[in-house]
Image: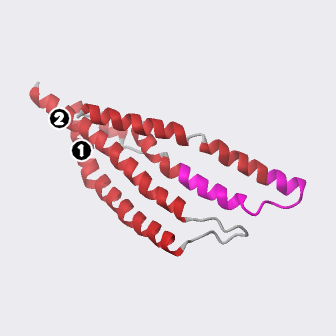
Amino acid sequence: MNTIARAIDVLNEWFGHLIAPLLAVITLIVIYDIAARFLIGRPSDWAFDVTKMLFGVHFMLMAAFGLRHHAHVEVDVLKRLLSRHKQAALDLLGYLIFFAPFIWMLFTFGWAFFERSFSRGETTNGMVAIPVYPVKGVIIVAAALLLLQSLAIVIRAFGELSKENVA
């Protein structure tokens, strides 16, 4: 089971390193748009929509990477006072009670959101009609990556609980 958890970690680590440079691309587009505004007196027709969509993609796809590195909010003050066995039990309960329903909702509503956008051929309302459904499809990918990373955490929690019980 630890092999599965490590494989999930590697996947999300690789994916995080792949997506992280997208922030530099967003920054370059914003700089371009600002320069166009000041140099030719007019911002581009597409930059605002593209940066908004790319930032959403970046945020969603980096969520599992953040979960892997414990970058999300936790109540560490209380958790640190517990033994490793109790920390693992708390992780297990937390992921089953709170995280599992969240992921289920993200998949369910995210899929409906994407499907509606795809079926309508939804585009942005700006001067340039950019398709929106690929960005909405990222919600499903992000949910899958988050589900996998939470599975890795649950596997480790089960491992900690079984190790403690054996010893």
Tell me the element at label 2. Answer: helix
Residue 53 covered by magenta stretch: yes
Q: Nearer the viewer, residue 21 or 95?
A: 21
Q: Quadrant of the N terminus?
A: top left
Q: Residue furthest right?
A: 40
Name the main secondary structure of what is drawn in magenta.
helix
Specify few, some or many for label 2: CA neighbours under 10 Å numbering under 14, 14-19, or 20 or more: some
Q: Which residue is mark 1?
A: 92
**In which quadrant of the rendered view does residue 87 lie?**
top left
Residue 108 is left or right of residue 94, and the answer is right
Q: Residue at x 35, y 38 (%)?
A: 8
Residue 158 spot, x, y in % from top left: 20, 38
Specify few, some or many for label 1: CA neighbours under 10 Å numbering under 14, 14-19, or 20 or more: many
Q: Are marks 2 and 1 in contact (CB under 8 Å)?
A: yes
**In which quadrant of the rendered view does residue 122 lie?**
bottom right
Nearer-N-terminus badge (2/1) = 1
Residue 167 is left or right of residue 46, and the answer is left
Residue 55 covered by magenta stretch: yes
Tag on residue 161? 2
Identified by mark 1, the residue type is Leu
Residues shaded magenta: 34-58
Calculate the distance from the C-alpha at mark 2 to the C-alpha at mark 1.
10 Å
Is residue 162 in view from this perspective? yes
Q: Residue at x 66, y 72 (%)?
A: 125
